[in-house]
Amino acid sequence: MFERFNLKDNSFPVTPNDQDKAQWFGFRPLKREFEGVMQRSGDEQLRLCVLNRGRLGAGKTNAAHYFITKYGEKQNIGKYLQFVFIIIESPKQPQRAFVDFATRLFNEVTFRRILQASQNLRTLRGPERLFADLLSVTGSEDIATVLSNLDTPSLLPSKTFLLGGGTARELRELGVAKRIINEHEFASAVIGTVHLLVHGQSDEKETLSRVLLWVDEMEDLVYFPTRYYLPFTQAIREVIDSTNEHLTLMLNFTFSEPEDLPAIENVLGQAIMQRVNQHIVFHEPTVADLRDYLIELFKANRRNGKMSSKTFPLSEGAFTLLIESAVSKTPRFLNKLCDMLLRDLEHMSDDQLELRKDGISAALVADKLPHILSLLEEARG
Amino acid sequence: MAEPMSQFRSAVCVLDTCSIINLDEIVLAGKDVLFYVRQSFDLYVSSIIQDEFLRHRALATSREASYWKGVLSNSCYTPSVLNSDAEIIGPFYSTPPSFSGNHNAGEHANTRVALELFLTRTTGHTIFVTDDEKARNAFLGMVRRAFPSLHVWTSVDVILYLGAVLLKEGRADFEGVRAALRDVYAARAKWEERDETAKSAIIRNQRYSVESLRILKEVTSKWRN
């Protein structure tokens, strides 16, 4: 579709997808801040809790996907064998918020990976010591029993147990007394799982890995009435406080005024806010930010490298006009704007578009922009 | 003939369905906010509110809510003169709607109730409680400008109003009122689309409400020291 513009068809994604490797364009100071977090995560053992605040479409979720792409496969990062990334969305069911949270976490990690870590540690430490270690971190005999005995035959009932289910027979076979029901028990299961992931990534020797738990859409807590919000934040606090090493917790918070910390504090509550030890704010982009962003995006999405200017298919004037109309907006807005503009121009001939000269003219873009901007405004672009 | 301002000292409350549902299950000083409303406020509603409440009954789940069919029935007022939406409410719109169907029907009817109660000197002031921001923007702002006796509140204002009294009397504490504010904002999820603009507006407004509560606490603390 965008072939004649020398751009890949999916050059302007609205949200990160699993098929394409996430990339980072422009916004270098922001990228450095995240790199700093990754660096500290590799060098320091103590827990880090980072609050990423930005408007919708500013790039918070993209940041998570970008850094998982960059570090997900990497070995020997500072003090750690590897980073174990877990990216989940905040719970959407206030009534069972922490159960929802734990379920998302287990499913994202996968039970097979938890099983592998358990098997590795059983081999390295022996089953009894593993049980004792898990009992010490979780405080629950039942959870320590299931996590320390995880193997292929017991995978399904163990999975059911960790998700809060299980028949009397299944529980008896697992050697546990009761299902896990309340937030505290689910928090213990999460804490035990983190212990396995931190220590059990190798079957040759005891190693340390660091868990990077990235929770998106934390602003949804605004829809939690107090009676559900308090137990949820209490359980999150339990996980944070019981995992004071080898964990980086990244919380994404979308808000139209990301600098307004008191407003965000009202939503997240003191239990979480007191544990945040770094803030990354996605400020409103400047003209220069958006310019760098789009030039890098164009460059990374070229079908071939032979084309002339950095701003192609746009002339310099058209490029400037486009950037100026996106000032105070977000990269996502700029992506949508470019996508709609190029789709709109796609049916015109190369001569009409002046593609063989300087690129699409400012006059042509100026003619198209008002309509596209109003469409984006209607759709709350 | 009575003095022109003889009704000035009396006030009534006209309540919208969405506010009843938003205030459901919210507790202050151990009692339902809706309990305070039905016990302490002089309530009037249009019959449409009763119908709307019954239609959305599943959204109000507290024990207190079970009394509200009767409460609304007893508070029902049918205007005898101001009985046409098109004639009475139409002029408050820049572009009047068709007034057919359910759209803003409760707010339109409640506005006629509020205006007739004032003009017949039944009351001097009407607290008009609604959380429907679209209705507020569409015509209620104009009604308020023409009739200053009509005070447009949201359910958040109800919490702050009650909170002030309960704080002053030492029956509620700051955190209790703050929790009620959180709950009333969270209740918007029952109605509103969860788009980012709406979410950001809730986060922003909640912050303003908590700031107001802090000031309110400062003032009421003068009675404690």
Image: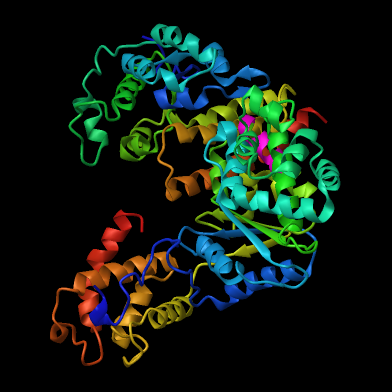
Name the image quarter holding residue A372.
bottom left
Expressed as whole percent of the image width and height from the top left, the position of residue B199 reads: 48, 46
Count of numbered circles on the image:
0
Does A358 appear above or below A334?
Answer: below
Quarter of image, res A367: bottom left
Queried whether the magenta region covers residue B7, the answer comes back as no
* Of the pair B92 and A49, the residue shown nearer to us: A49
In percent of width and height, residue A298 lies at 38, 80
Quadrant location, the N terminus of chain A: bottom left
| A231 in magenta | yes
Q: Is residue A271 visible to the viewer in this orientation of the structure? A: no
Whether residue B87 is situated above or below residue B94 in the rendered picture = above
Q: Which residues are magenta?
A: A227-236
> What secondary structure do most residues of the magenta stretch adopt?
helix
Q: Identify the image quadrant of the C terminus of chain A.
A: bottom left
Question: Does residue A220 show up?
Answer: yes
Q: Position of residue A158 (x, y in %)?
A: 65, 38
- Residue nearer the viewer, B42 or A111: A111
Q: Residue placed at 74% from the left, 29% from the top?
A: A176
* In the image, farthest residue toward the front: A153
Image: A298 above or below B70:
below
Up the image or down, A375 lies above or below A110; here it is below
Residue at position x 48%, y 72% from top? Answer: A23
In front here: B95 or A363?
A363
- Side of A302 relative to A118 (left or right): left
